[in-house]
Image (cartoon, rainbow, N blue to C red):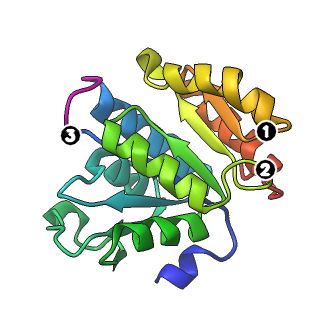
């Protein structure tokens, strides 16, 4: 099944979490994002580890006809609602992140936990980060990625030529697809939809 995921249409590695402290709207944001992205025909790959899995994102993407692949640790207990979702179990965290980095055309960060943001960053770096790597789109709802926006402006702008082509921010769910579509174009793929 996973081989099917990488052919044809672009794959978005979407990082989100509804565990731990953070935005109380995360589940709603994941549902909206899953539906919006799936309707555009992209494929979605998600990380699931330490019992954290983006169930609202996955279920809404699948309800909208989307294809989803879960990359999981060995301990994950798959909820019954996701029993038929393709799943790859990979023992080591670095290997899981490397697999996601290899599959992704573009990375998408939704407001979540520090763990999901950390995993997003690690996978993005494994994919080459900026400097010819793959773009990342961050949904900055309720200033979830404001620190990264500042870091991007203050640090990346001086060390990474055309940094704004690799790290893209949006503040509205309605604009999320526009930014992802643009990033897909920057990644050298024809945008879908």
Q: Nearer the viewer, residue 129 or 168?
A: 129
Residue 143, horizontal then vertical, whole percent: 46, 17
- Nearer the N terminus, badge 2 or badge 3? 3
Q: Nearer the viewer, residue 186 or 113?
A: 113
Which label sits in the foreground, 3 or 1?
1
Is residue 172 one of those drawn in magenta? Answer: no
Magenta stretch, residue numbers: 19-24
Asked if 68 appears above or below 117 in the picture, the reply is below
Apparent side of residue 89 relative to residue 75 in the rendered image (left or right): right
- Quick one: label 1, few (<14), some, or many (20+) residues within 10 Å? some
Kindly identify which numbered label has been placed on residue 19.
3
Seen at 32% across and 53% down, the residue is: 59
> Dominant secondary structure of the magenta stretch?
loop
Apparent side of residue 15 relative to residue 154 in the rendered image (left or right): left
Q: Name the residue under label 2.
A: 131
Seen at 30% across and 49% down, the residue is: 54
Residue 37, horizontal then vertical, whole percent: 54, 46
Seen at 66% across and 77% down, the residue is: 7
Q: Name the residue under label 1.
A: 160
Seen at 25% across and 39% down, the residue is: 18
């Amino acid at each position: 099944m996973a081989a099917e995921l990488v052919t044809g249409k672009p794959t978005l590695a979407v990082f989100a979490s509804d565990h731990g402290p953070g935005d109380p709207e995360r589940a709603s944001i994941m549902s909206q994002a899953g539906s919006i992205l799936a309707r555009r025909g992209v494929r979605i790959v998600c990380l699931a580890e330490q019992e954290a899995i983006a169930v609202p994102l996955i279920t809404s993407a699948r309800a909208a006809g989307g294809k989803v692949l879960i990359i999981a640790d060995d301990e994950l207990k798959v909820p019954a609602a996701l029993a038929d979702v393709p799943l790859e179990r990979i023992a080591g965290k670095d290997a899981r992140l490397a697999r996601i980095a290899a599959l992704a055309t573009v990375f998408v960060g939704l407001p979540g936990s520090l763990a999901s943001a950390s995993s997003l960053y690690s996978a993005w770096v494994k994919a080459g980060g900026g400097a010819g790597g793959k773009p990342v789109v961050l949904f900055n709802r309720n200033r979830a990625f404001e620190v990264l926006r500042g870091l991007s402006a203050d640090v990346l702008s001086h060390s990474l030529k055309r940094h704004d082509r690799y790290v893209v921010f949006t503040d509205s769910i309605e604009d999320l697809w526009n930014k992802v579509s643009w990033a897909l174009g920057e990644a050298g793929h024809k945008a879908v939809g």
